[in-house]
Every structure is written in C-alpha cells, then in structure tokens.
Image (spheres, grey):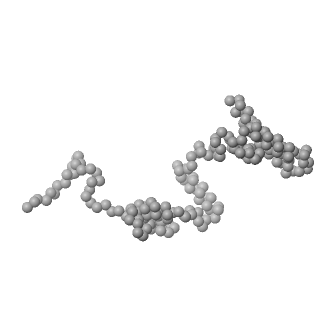
Amino acid sequence: MTRRQTRRLDWGFPRWRGYGAESEAVKVRLCDRHGCDLPGDRPAPKSPNSPEKWWFCETHAGEYNKNWDYFAGLTAEEAAEREANERRDASGYQDPKHYGWAGPGDGSRSRDELRALDALGLEVDAEFDAVRVAWRKLAKENHPDVKPGDAAAAERFRQIQAAYDVLRAAEERRLAL
C-alpha cells in the first residue's frame, strides 16, 4: 500500500516550487462573441450607464467599438464642455505640447510665415524669389491707385503688403545667420 504524500514542497522558506506553479485549474473567460474561442479579456458595456459588460477578445472588441460615438446625443456646447473637462482631468494623457508649435511644413518656417505664404497663394516650400514675384504681381493688381475707391482691393493690398513684410523679415534673419 502506497502512502499518500501530505506534505507539500513549498511548506516553508525558501519556496521549492516557482510562483504560479499551482496545480489548480485557471479560469479563462471566453469571448462573448458567438463562435469565438479566444480569451475574452477586454470589457465593453452592454448598454450606456450599465454596470453589466460584454467580454471580448481584441479583434471583437475593436469591431464592437468601431462605430462608437462618444458624444452621441449631446449638443455642440455639451460636447465641447465634456471634452474640456476631460482634457483638464486627464492632463497626463494630453497631446505633447512640443508637437503643437509647428503646424504644417518641414519646420523651417513659423506659423506667421506659413500664413503669409498662403495669403500670397504660394506653397510652403516656395523660395524668396517666388515670393517677390507673387508679391509684385498681386500688388500691381490690387494697388489703390489702380483700383481707386475699391475697399476690398485696398484691404487685399494691405494683406499682401503685410505678408511680404513678414516673409522679407524672415529672409533677412536667415541671411544674417
């Protein structure tokens, strides 16, 4: 007759077995999607404001959340207020501030320069010679002496002149370096 062992090997210190080497069965929750036999380790609410949850695998959780509209049923003001509150409360998860300064382009131009190029109708990578040509052409078309009494042309001329001044100052700074 064989005697049954009653003493375990991990009865004291040091533990003689590795942690997590228990022989008990581990409960695995399966994905709640019909026919899926993967582990369901991603919770999803069954309905809004309900504590009950579905448990999906990664693939089916993505499928479940694909068309989720977080701001459904809210007015624009309520949605903006909720977004502002959540941005304030979750400041650790904000977009990094160092990405916000540049905007479009390759980083060699400031926002004012990009706006000035847009006012002159040029691409963000335009050289200063192209800036000068576009400025002269638009200034000749919209000059108050050419179109006297036209307030829209006078305003457009002021915008063109301000854009050229911004770009000229930036070019002078680049040449000075």
* Picture layout, residue 53 above or below residue 158: below
Front residue of this view, candidates 14 and 62: 62
Residue 60 at x, y percent in the picture: 46, 63
Residue occupying image coordinates x 85% and y 46%:
141
**Image quadrant containing the C terminus:** top right
Q: Is residue 77 visible?
A: yes
Q: Quadrant of residue 131?
A: top right
**Which residue is farthest left?**
1
Residue occupying image coordinates x 77% and y 42%:
163
Front residue of this view, candidates 108 and 136: 136
Residue 78 at x, y percent in the picture: 62, 62
Front residue of this view, candidates 19 and 133: 133
* Picture layout, residue 39 above or below residue 155: below
Q: Quadrant of residue 126?
A: top right
Q: Is residue 158 visible?
A: no
Task: Left or right? Give the position of 136 relative to 78.
Answer: right
Residue occupying image coordinates x 65% and y 46%:
104
Residue 138 at x, y percent in the picture: 82, 45
Residue occupying image coordinates x 19% and y 54%:
8
**Image quadrant containing the N terminus:** bottom left
The total of numbered circles placed on residues is 0
* Picture layout, residue 121 above or below residue 62: above
Q: Quadrant of residue 23?
A: bottom left
Residue 52 at x, y percent in the picture: 44, 68
Task: Left or right? Give the position of 144 relative to 53.
Answer: right
**Which residue is farthest top?**
176
